[in-house]
Image: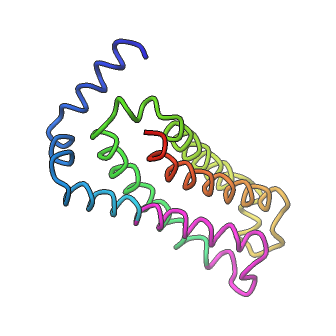
Amino acid sequence: MPPFLAEFLQTLAGSAPAAFFRNSTFAYASLNACHIFSIGLVVGSIATLDLRLLGLFYRFPVSALAPPLTRVAAAGLYFVIVTGFLLFCVRPLAYAVNAAFLAKITLVTLGVINALALRSSRGWALALEDELVPDSVRAAALRSLLIWAGAVFAGRWIGFLQ
């Protein structure tokens, strides 16, 4: 690890929020619970939309499901980032070299990129018009399910590699 990165991570570890969460079992457990709840918002809403795009829940139009589920996923992602950063600050040097943590961050990034790419595609516009869901959209939905499942698995794996 480059010295400047180690120094930055050490500064994070010494910050007031990191010390607060490190020294309060209740606060740390509450933060962790908020992080898990936020993950549930993200994965639950994305999985529901992805499953619809793959053909389940076909009685519900994509145009009716997509807007609220996308907003819930975005709000959940915001809270995942905030709570995740605070959790990271508690032990940044350990997490920065944890393979499962690095895999989780990579998969979350890929999940966001996949979602943004899908939302800007012509296929997404067609799916929102309740026309036939294009194969490219179905492929993105399947990719999304696999990526987010992998992120959850990697997140749970973090504790086993400490």
Image: 154 above or below 66: above
- 73 or 85: nearer the eye? 85
Magenta residues: mostly which secondary structure?
helix
Residue 151 coordinates in the image, percent (x, y):
57, 51
Image: 40 above or below 112: below
Q: Is residue 78 left or right of residue 141?
A: left
Image: 162 above or below 128: above
| Residue range highlighted in magenta | 37-64
Residue 44 coordinates in the image, percent (x, y):
55, 69
Residue 60 coordinates in the image, percent (x, y):
68, 84
Image: 7 above or below 160: above
Residue closest to the far top = 3
- 39 or 58: nearer the eye? 39
The quarter of the rendered structure image containing the N terminus is top left
Q: Is residue 155 left or right of residue 145?
A: left
- 56 or 153: nearer the eye? 153
Residue 41 coordinates in the image, percent (x, y):
47, 67
Image quarter for residue 18?
top left
Image quarter for residue 124?
bottom right
Q: Is residue 54 within the magenta segment?
A: yes
Residue lying at 38% horizontally and 32% vertically, measured from the top left: 94
Residue lying at 28% horizontally and 57% vertically, measured from the top left: 31
| Coloration mode | rainbow
The quarter of the rendered structure image containing the C terminus is top left
Q: How many dots with numbers?
A: 0
Residue lying at 84% horizontally and 72% vertically, measured from the top left: 132
Residue lying at 72% horizontally and 54% vertically, measured from the top left: 143
